[in-house]
Image (tube, rainbow, N blue to C red):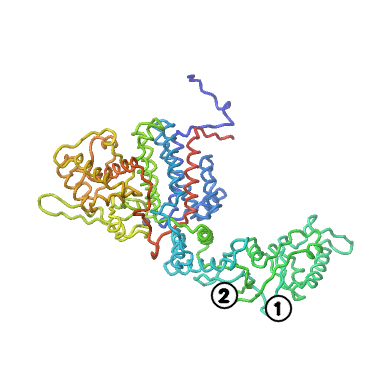
């Protein structure tokens, strides 16, 4: 290779760097930190001083993307994924970005000592298998939401609102808001199915008022500071009130608007006003129109004259409000003033039942409604100006999520349970398909484990993120039936003086999992399940391949495994099970027995094991993670894992297809459970995983300047 350095002059105009560049990885790390910091109930807002020197608070992915200008193409790519997610589902944008950037980061680190092709092949296999599992909406983590059950639906909304810590809503405000969001949403559902789909919920905010509560109104609320109630009175008892809507400003703009025959005695503007006013007045009288509404402004003279004639003029409505009026009244807006008479004569008018003057918390509004309009207005409580955007945006997210739930009906476990499940799935997929994968990718099991561990680590981190991350992995456990996330409550007891100890407790669980959909009793008694500390990496049992007996002594694992496998073989034909975990119960072991078993074994095996056991008991953060070490020795706490692995192997061989027996099912009647929208979360995961695959194939980033 030549050592000649090109002088800067010659390379100017293009700047490349490899993605293996350390600066690139550290840039990804900074970007990831930014996204993670705003995520979940423990997340915080980000104070941004942007390029033009304006300070803004950002607390959502869309605000971060809007306020910050990112330069690097791969970060821009991830931002595009986030935007796509927000546009499609209205939520889980941050999640999409976090999952994608973390996988990219971990894979680039993997790539430092594993060939790119291996990392890429193994990742792609895991991704396709995982997405395949998710499309089947697995019973361990998904369930149908009963839209008629207010409790469930409000819990669902509360999960979304509760994930935004910066809103600073207390319990009362949270309850009030979530209930009103659901109420407003229900009002937007048409009585009969119409091709137009859902109605409309307008989200408005109250300015400078004292109300701390949200309120729902039927119809559209138009803020009119100086309306005289007498004007509205006139419309009472009219019955069908006709409305015409414009989406162009009724103002004179040089060269743009209506052609005016200019006469020397008057200004062009005056001519415009006269012509438009005459046309409007005659058409409105002839077609019996009561209200002229405009998304944009109306010339003050025209407004004044129309109102003098008894018409109601509602101007500067904005896009959202005029959309709502269109939905509500069924009108078609006029968007062109060029041939006003023709437009006015052929315009599809809207119909209203109610036009009322409303005074709410010291403010004057006009309420427009139609009985079949399926349009409602949600007036949000007053918050600080800095959080107003986030509040509005989060409310819109809730409404979007509700719409998805009504159409699809599926929700997925929140609070980190879905991610814990995903991590477990990756671990099981690898453990049951190791041989297949080594054949398929030509990679060594060690490399496969390392890539899979990256996935497990990323999912587990995402699972723990809503709780502010993990200080020690023994604080958290995953159950063996649903694979949900549990907070472990340590209660370690020493049984007797002889040094033998019981460890029931580091695996003891609280009353329910993090999402609340799995109860302790259900796992313990119905499915005979157990709890294991969370894993940030894959533990694979190589005894299946190497048949290498590492233990000696009467109570070695080698003695136990065949016994277990034998027992299982008998059962398997009759009892085809969905997962290895449910088969555990077929042993007739109680989860506690298993633990005692493993403890007894631990006692009479090598010193290493006793060592590690003590470390667990002391609740020290102990990552027993040297993979090479695992090949040689087994830790007591891995008994469950290795047992599971063995079962996996057996299940695979016996090719079971009947999944009905012992089918797991989430609880449906749970108060305050954490649900996420399944379609939104699925879309987020799919976008992130596919985006990661694309980005991982990037070798060079080029800045064309
Ligand atoms: Zn759960």
Q: Report ligand 1 position as a quadrant.
A: bottom left
Establish if 234 lies above or below 490: below
Where's residue 214, x and y in %? 51, 70
Q: Nearer the viewer, residue 30 or 641?
A: 641
* Residue at the top extreme of this rendering: 2
Where's residue 340, x and y in %? 80, 62
Q: Residue at x 59, y 66 (%)?
A: 190
Q: Which residue is mark 2?
A: 360
| Snapshot quadrant of residue 426 | top left
Question: Can residue 207 be seen at all in this image of the molecule?
Answer: no
As drawn, is 233 to the left or to the right of 214? right
Establish if 112 lies above or below 271: above
Where's residue 362, x and y in %? 57, 75
Q: CA distance from mark 1 to mark 2?
A: 24 Å
CB atoms of marks 1 and 2 within 8 Å: no
The tag on residue 238 is 1
SS of the residue at dot 1? loop
SS of the residue at dot 2? strand
Give the crowd class for mark 1: few <14, some 14-19, many >=20 residues within 10 Å: few
Q: Residue at x 34, y 44 (%)?
A: 536
């Amino acid at each position: 290779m030549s050592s000649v350095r090109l002088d800067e002059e010659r390379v100017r105009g293009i700047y490349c760097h490899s993605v293996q560049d350390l600066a690139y990885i550290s840039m990804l790390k900074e970007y990831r930190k930014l996204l993670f910091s705003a995520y979940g109930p423990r997340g915080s807002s980000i104070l941004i001083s942007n390029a033009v020197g304006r300070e803004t608070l950002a607390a959502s992915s869309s605000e971060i993307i809007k306020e910050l200008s990112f330069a690097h193409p791969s970060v821009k790519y991830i931002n595009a994924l986030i935007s796509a997610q927000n546009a499609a589902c209205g939520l889980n944008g941050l999640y999409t970005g976090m999952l994608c950037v973390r996988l990219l980061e971990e894979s680039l680190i993997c790539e430092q000592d594993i060939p790119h092709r291996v990392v890429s092949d193994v990742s792609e296999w895991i991704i396709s298998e995982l997405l395949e599992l998710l499309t089947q909406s697995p019973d361990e983590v998904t369930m149908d939401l009963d839209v008629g059950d207010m409790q469930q639906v409000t819990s669902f909304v509360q999960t979304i609102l509760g994930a935004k810590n910066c809103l600073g809503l207390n319990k009362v405000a949270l309850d009030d808001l979530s209930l009103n969001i659901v109420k407003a949403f229900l009002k937007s559902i048409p009585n009969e199915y119409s091709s137009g789909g859902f109605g409309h919920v307008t989200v408005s905010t109250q300015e400078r008022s004292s109300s701390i509560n949200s309120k729902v109104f039927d119809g559209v609320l138009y803020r009119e500071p100086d309306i005289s109630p007498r004007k509205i009175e006139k419309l009472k008892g009219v019955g069908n009130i006709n409305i015409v809507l414009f989406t162009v400003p009724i103002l004179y703009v040089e060269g743009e608007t209506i052609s005016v025959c200019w006469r020397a005695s008057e200004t062009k503007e005056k001519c415009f006003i006269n012509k438009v006013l005459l046309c409007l007045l005659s058409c409105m009288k002839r077609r019996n129109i009561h209200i002229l509404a405009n998304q944009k402004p109306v010339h003050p003279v025209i407004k004044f004259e129309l109102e003098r004639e008894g018409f109601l003029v509602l101007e500067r409505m904005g896009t959202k409000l005029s959309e709502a009026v269109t939905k509500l009244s069924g009108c078609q807006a006029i968007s062109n003033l060029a041939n006003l008479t023709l437009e006015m004569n052929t315009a599809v008018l809207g119909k209203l039942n109610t036009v009322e003057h409303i005074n709410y918390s010291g403010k004057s509004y006009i309420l427009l409604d139609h009985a079949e309009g399926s349009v409602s207005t949600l007036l949000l409580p007053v918050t600080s100006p800095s959080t107003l955007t986030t509040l509005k945006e989060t409310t819109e997210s809730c409404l979007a999520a509700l719409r998805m739930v009504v159409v699809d009906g599926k929700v997925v476990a929140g609070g980190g349970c879905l991610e814990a499940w995903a991590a477990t799935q990756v671990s099981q997929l690898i453990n049951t398909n190791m041989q297949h994968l080594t054949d398929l990718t030509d990679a060594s099991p060690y490399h496969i484990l390392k890539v899979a561990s990256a996935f497990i680590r990323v999912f587990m981190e995402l699972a723990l993120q809503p709780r502010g991350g993990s200080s020690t992995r023994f604080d958290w456990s995953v159950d063996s039936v649903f694979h949900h996330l549990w907070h472990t409550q340590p209660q370690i007891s020493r049984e007797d003086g002889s040094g033998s100890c019981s460890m029931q407790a580091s695996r003891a669980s609280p009353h329910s999992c993090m999402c609340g959909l799995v109860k302790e009793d259900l796992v313990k008694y119905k499915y005979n399940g157990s709890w294991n500390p969370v894993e940030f990496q894959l533990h694979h049992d190589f005894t299946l391949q190497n048949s290498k007996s590492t233990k000696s002594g009467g109570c070695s694992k080698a003695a136990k495994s065949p016994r277990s496998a034998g027992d299982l073989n008998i059962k398997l034909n009759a009892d085809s099970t969905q997962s290895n975990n449910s088969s555990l119960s077929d042993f007739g072991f109680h989860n506690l027995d298993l633990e005692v078993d493993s403890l007894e074994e631990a006692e009479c095996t090598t010193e290493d094991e006793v060592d590690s056991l003590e470390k667990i008991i002391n609740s020290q953060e102990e990552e027993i993670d040297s993979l090479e070490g695992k090949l040689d020795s087994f830790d007591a706490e891995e008994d469950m894992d290795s047992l599971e692995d063995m079962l996996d192997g057996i299940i695979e061989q016996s090719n079971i297809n009947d999944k009905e027996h012992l089918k797991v099912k989430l609880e449906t009647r749970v108060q305050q459970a954490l649900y996420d929208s399944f379609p939104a979360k699925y879309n987020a995961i799919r976008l992130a995983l596919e985006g990661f695959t694309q980005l991982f194939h990037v070798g060079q980033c080029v800045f064309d300047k």
